[in-house]
Amino acid sequence: MPTPDAGRRAHLRQAATHVLFDNWTGAATVPSRALYPHQWSWDSAFIAIGLRHIAPRRAQRELETLLGAQWGDGRIPHIAFNPSVPLGAYFPSPDFWRSSTAGRNAGAPSTTQTSGIVQPPVHALAAWQVHLADPAESRRRGFLPRVYPRLAAWHRYLSTSRDLAGGSLAAVVHPWEPGLDNSPCWDEALARVEPAPRQSFRRADLDHSSAADRPTDLDYARYVRLATTYRDHAYDDARTPHAFAIEDPSFNALLIASEHALAAIARAVGADAGAHLRRAETATAALIDRLWDPAGGIFLARDLVTGEPIAGHSVSGLVPLIVPGLPQDIASALVGTAHGPRFRLGQVHLVPSYDLTAKKFDANRYWRGPSWFNTAWLIHHGLVRHGEAGAAGRLRAQFLTAAYRSGFAEYLEPYTGEGRGIRRFSWTAALALDLLHACDEGDSAR
Ligand code: 2M8
């Protein structure tokens, strides 16, 4: 698939800009006005990465608004709620999480209402890129000196309170935390969780999307139970009996890549970069030691309750391609796996979220098979990092064409490329802007 020409790119840029501006609420961007009417953590990081090309100051603001919802223990909550949105518009709503009371000891803010769980740490990566887009404006506003201590506290939280196994990797304690909500990789761990009574909650997601695409009611009942248990233990990581505790490859790869970005930010603000680089090095060694599966040529999540690797092959296991300094043999194996029968890079649309050859693969249901734009963007960067310019270029062209054709869909059916989920989805538009910029840079380098 050829890269769209300059005329189509201008059109695409305009359409993507409209999506982001329409989804801007004055201080941050919602992923989608209908389905996700609040600020989501990793969405905002991806959104800032795109926004920086069209409105660098707004991109700074996006991240600063999110950081304003940070807890005293360093965690960045996965949702910062907009108080003007009715409670029934999204579930679980602020009255479920009760952050300002249940989270008081963990330092939850008293004014902003948030969830109590987290999402992947893409923020330092985003902050550094946002700075680089307009360094003069960033310096004028003191952007980096303001965000650095908050980002450092965030990484400290993940590397200490969330290092549940003491193995130098961060654990996720809810399937919503790695962002790949209902990946088949979580099935076994989730099956151990006693579902919350079905009548104890009302899903709002089904008001906006088809039940066949979304997680099942049983999954939701288990998500609710896990979140309730965490809340009822005051969101205290040491005291909560975590029935679900997993070391996820992409969560940790993003932490490592962000730790490198934090080192660059530290250098820019005159702080010590060494500690960040050392942490990145230790976590990279742990990622390989604890999660690399040489036989499968992919990283596997580890279930900390059983102590065993989780056998399913998910796109999460390919994301460590973005880790700076990943040994060449591992990077080559990952590229091979991406092109192999399980993910068929270049032959299907983008990168399927789950192994195409597995029984549990589902081409339509949420993170159980469909291709997502944010993971494709990450794999694209991994391919560029490891000198796979041809494959990266093809993936970029596919991404841009699909983003446009699908009306900036939330995700795609990998075989047909048809859009699924919500349309005018913010990170799809934002990351399209970022890849358009990469195309323009390629043009000017020619
Ligand atoms: C999806 O997750 C939310 C819960 O956080 C949901 O299903 O309601 C996931 O795709 C997640 O990765 C994403 O951040 C969020 C908002 O786009 O939606």
Image (cartoon, helix red, strand yellow):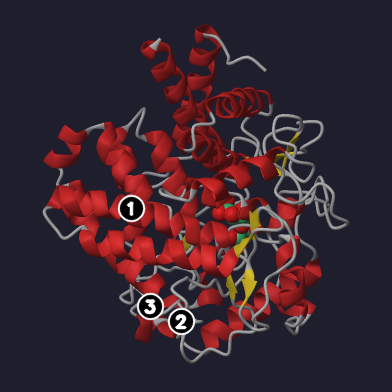
Q: At 53% across and 42% down in the image, what residue appears?
A: 378
Mark 1 Cα shell of 10 Å, populated few (<14), some (14-19), many (≥20)? many
**Dot 2 alpha-carbon crowd within 10 angstroms: few under 14, some 14 to 19, many 20 or more:** few
Q: Tell me the quadrant of the picture where the N terminus can be found.
A: top right
Q: Which is nearer the eye, 348 or 34?
A: 348
Amino acid on which the number 2 mark rests in the picture: Gly
Above or below, 432 relative to 252 = above
Residue 278 appears at what percent x and percent y?
A: 30, 64
Residue 442 lies in quadrant: top left
Q: Circle 2 sits on which residue?
A: 166
Give SS at disc 1: helix
The quarter of the displayed image where residue 198 is located: bottom right
Q: Quadrant of ligand 1?
A: bottom right
Instruction: Please indicate whether residue 11 sits to the left or right of residue 418 in the image.
Output: left
Residue at 58% x, 58% y is: 179
Kindly check if marks 3 and 2 are in contact, taking CB atoms under 8 A apart as contact. Answer: no
Extreme-front residue of the structure: 329
Residue on which the image places disc 1? 260
Q: Can you give x and y, in whole percent of width and height, for residue 327 in the image?
A: 48, 50
Total labels: the figure holds 3
Residue under numbered circle 3: 160
Whole-angstrom CA distance, mark 1 to mark 2, is 21 Å
Tag 3: amino acid: Thr
Query: Looking at the image, is mark 3 or mark 1 nearer the viewer?
Result: 1
Mark 1 sits near ligand 1, with its Cβ under 8 Å away: no
Residue 171: x and y, percent?
A: 52, 73
User: Few, some or many C-alpha atoms within 10 Å of disc 3 (few <14, some 14-19, many ≥20)?
Assistant: few
